[in-house]
Image (cartoon, rainbow, N blue to C red):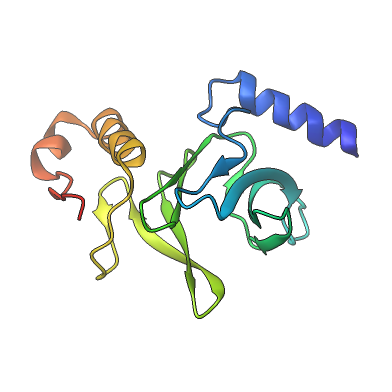
Amino acid sequence: MKTKLLLASLIAICSGCESTPSEEGSASPSGDYVAELRLGRTPDVDGNVVWTVTIVDNSGKVVYRDANSEFPAQFGVILAWDADDRLWVYGGDSGRVFFWERAADKWQKCYWGCVLGREISRQVVPPTSIRAKLRTTEQRDLSPVERGLRSMPTVTEE
């Protein structure tokens, strides 16, 4: 079992995905938290191997684990923190962006949107590394006609 998970990890890393060992264990700007990508299995019948977002505090205690991860291990992910200690994750399989933030002493997972832009009403903006990936993915995946009809909204960091 561990051999299969290790193999899946190596395949994902060697296939040109965004997730690399150096991005695992990404510390928040405050230094209070560390985000980790861990291989796990989905709770469905298929038991697919997925990247599971896990947040640990500075004492090493797991304070959040995404029990319903949506990031297949064969695709890459990008982890990035913003200045407000929000953890952002870009999923390479679908271009979807999620963020996690603490509210009332609890971590909450929020869906932000996808390559075509923000789909939530809140005015939160992904970090630069994720915004750059969204623009790159958008241009690569859209036809020339679609590129002319759709564009990322212009956003600035607060």
Q: Which quarter of the rendering shows the C terminus?
A: bottom left
Residue at the spot x=55%, y=76% of the render?
A: 105
Q: Which residue lies furthest to the left in this view?
A: 148
Question: Where 121 falls versus 136 (above or below)?
Answer: below
Taking the image as shown, residue 45 lies to the left or right of residue 88, namely: right
Query: Would residue 35 appear left or right of 121 to someone viewing this image?
Result: right
Closer to us: 75 or 132: 132
In x, y percent, where is residue 10?
Answer: 71, 24
Vertical placement of residue 18 versus 16, above or below = below
Quadrant in the rendering for residue 36: top right
User: Which residue is located at x 64 percent, y 62 percent?
Assistant: 68
104 on left or right of 116: right
The picture places residue 112, in percent across and down from the top left corner, at 36, 59
Please name the residue shown 88% across and 37% down the image: 2
Considering every residue shown, the one lying at the far bottom of the view is 104
Residue 33: horizontal and vertical position, in percent? 58, 54
Occupied quadrant, residue 143:
top left
Q: Residue at x 29, y 34 (%)?
A: 132
Up-down relation of residue 122 to residue 92 (above or below): below
Position of the N terminus by quadrant: top right
Looking at the rendered structure, the number of numbered marks drawn on it comes to 0
Q: In this view, does 60 lie above or below 73?
A: below
Q: Which of 135 and 123 is in front in this view?
A: 123
Percent across and percent down for residue 71 are 58, 47
Q: Quadrant of residue 14?
A: top right
